[in-house]
Amino acid sequence: MAVVNACHRHARISATKVRPFTEMIRGKAAAEGLDILRYEPNRGARVLERVLKSAMANAEEKGARNVDSLKIVEARVDGGPMYKRIRPRARGMAFVVRTRMSHVHIGIDAPEVT
């Protein structure tokens, strides 16, 4: 059993916006996961869909036979670095604006890969 991975590092979306979609597709077939993500109207689903397509292409490149039936064994989103900026506020105060990033990882089980 070989696991084929794909990741998108430094995605300009916070991890909390993508995590619910990873829970929806974890453990399902790759084609079923694509169908689930395709009809979700959120930007986090688009990011995850691109990474899943990349993982399927990686599995096909490594020699997997039926790419659509491969199982998603790992789907996780980790927090990445943050852009920190200062926003001026009233009475001379300053607030920190944190633009969050995330690292999206997907692993597909490919038993025929050599």
Image: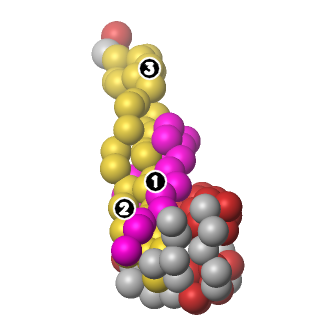
Magenta stretch: includes residue 62: no
- At mark 3, the secondary structure is strand
- Is residue 58 placed above or below 64 in the rendered structure? above
Nearer-N-terminus badge (1/2): 2
Picture quadrant where residue 111 is located: bottom left
Nearer-N-terminus badge (3/1): 3
- At mark 2, the secondary structure is strand
Nearer-N-terminus badge (2/3): 2
Task: Give yes or no for contact between labels 1 and 2 (Cβ–Cβ under 8 Å).
Answer: yes
Residue of label 2: 76
Disc number lying in front (3 or 1) = 1
Residue of label 3: 85
Q: Residues within 10 Å of mark 3 (few under 14, many from 20)?
A: few
Q: CA distance from mark 2 to mark 3?
A: 28 Å
Amino acid at circle 3:
Arg
Amino acid at circle 1:
Val
Picture quadrant where residue 105 is located: bottom left
Number of marks in picture:
3
Task: Give yes or no for contact between labels 3 and 1 (Cβ–Cβ under 8 Å).
Answer: no
Give, as a single range, the part of the protein colored magenta.
Answer: 1-19
Is 103 displayed left or right of 47 in the figure?
left
Picture quadrant where residue 40 is located: bottom right
Amino acid at circle 2:
Arg
Q: CA distance from mark 1 to mark 2?
A: 6 Å
**Point 64% across, 85% down: residue:** 66
Q: Position of residue 4 (x, y in %)?
A: 48, 62
Q: CA distance from mark 3 to mark 1?
A: 24 Å
- Numbered mark located on residue 18 in the image: none
Disc number lying in front (2 or 3) = 2
Q: Position of residue 83 (x, y in %)?
A: 44, 26
- Numbered mark located on residue 104 in the image: 1
